[in-house]
């Protein structure tokens, strides 16, 4: 069984990745109504893309693709 943690990264008041640069007072809260907010949807989507900054899920997404490409004996049953 595989487990991958996809993170929701915060953003600063300018919409950028604040990890390692901003103080907690400058970090915006993620809207709980994200499905109603196009900017929040775009921000969440961008966090799934491989980027140069630290606010991405590149390693986790690669692990998801690896797990999806791995054949599971639990699903196929024993070989005759």
Image (cartoon, helix red, strand yellow):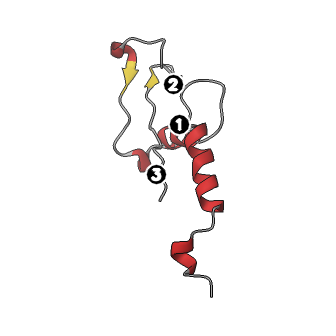
Q: Is 17 placed above or below 30 here?
A: above
Q: Which residue is depicted at the point 66% across and 25% down?
A: 52
Q: Earlier in the sequence, mark 1 or mark 3?
A: 3
Q: Are marks 2 and 1 in contact (CB under 8 Å)?
A: yes
Q: Which residue is depicted at the point 48% across and 11% down?
A: 21
Give how far across and how far down residue 32 sits, in percent. Answer: 33, 43
Residue 79, quarter of the rendered image: bottom right
Secondary structure beneath disc 2?
loop
Q: Earlier in the sequence, mark 3 or mark 2?
A: 3
Residue 12, quarter of the rendered image: top left
Please name the residue that numbered disc 1 is placed on.
Answer: 43
Q: Which of 45 and 73 is in front in this view?
A: 73
Q: Which of 40 and 1 is in front in this view?
A: 1
Please name the residue that numbered disc 3 is placed on.
Answer: 3
Q: How many marks?
A: 3
User: How would you rate the neighbour count of disc 3 (Cα within 10 Å): few for under 14, some for 14-19, many for 20 or more?
Assistant: few
Q: Which of 24 and 52 is in front in this view?
A: 52
52 relative position to 35: left or right:
right
Q: Which of marks 2 and 1 is nearer the N terminus?
A: 2
Q: Which residue lies furthest to the bottom in this view?
A: 80
- Label 1, label 3: how many angstroms apart (C-alpha)? 23 Å
38 relative position to 52: left or right:
left
Q: Nearer the viewer, mark 3 or mark 2?
A: 3
- Label 2, label 1: how many angstroms apart (C-alpha)? 8 Å
Secondary structure beneath disc 3?
loop
14 relative position to 80: left or right:
left
Please name the residue that numbered disc 2 is placed on.
Answer: 15
Give how far across and how far down residue 75 sits, in percent. Answer: 53, 76
Q: Is 69 placed above or below 51 here?
A: below
Q: Is 62 placed above or below 80 here?
A: above
Which label sits on residue 63? none
């Amino acid at each position: 069984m595989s487990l991958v943690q996809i993170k929701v990264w915060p953003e600063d008041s300018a919409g950028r990745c604040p990890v390692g640069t901003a103080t907690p007072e400058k970090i915006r809260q993620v809207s709980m109504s994200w499905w109603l907010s196009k900017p929040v949807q775009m921000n969440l989507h961008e966090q799934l893309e491989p980027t140069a900054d630290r606010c991405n899920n590149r390693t986790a997404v690669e692990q998801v693709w690896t797990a999806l490409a791995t054949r599971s004996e639990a699903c196929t049953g024993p070989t005759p």
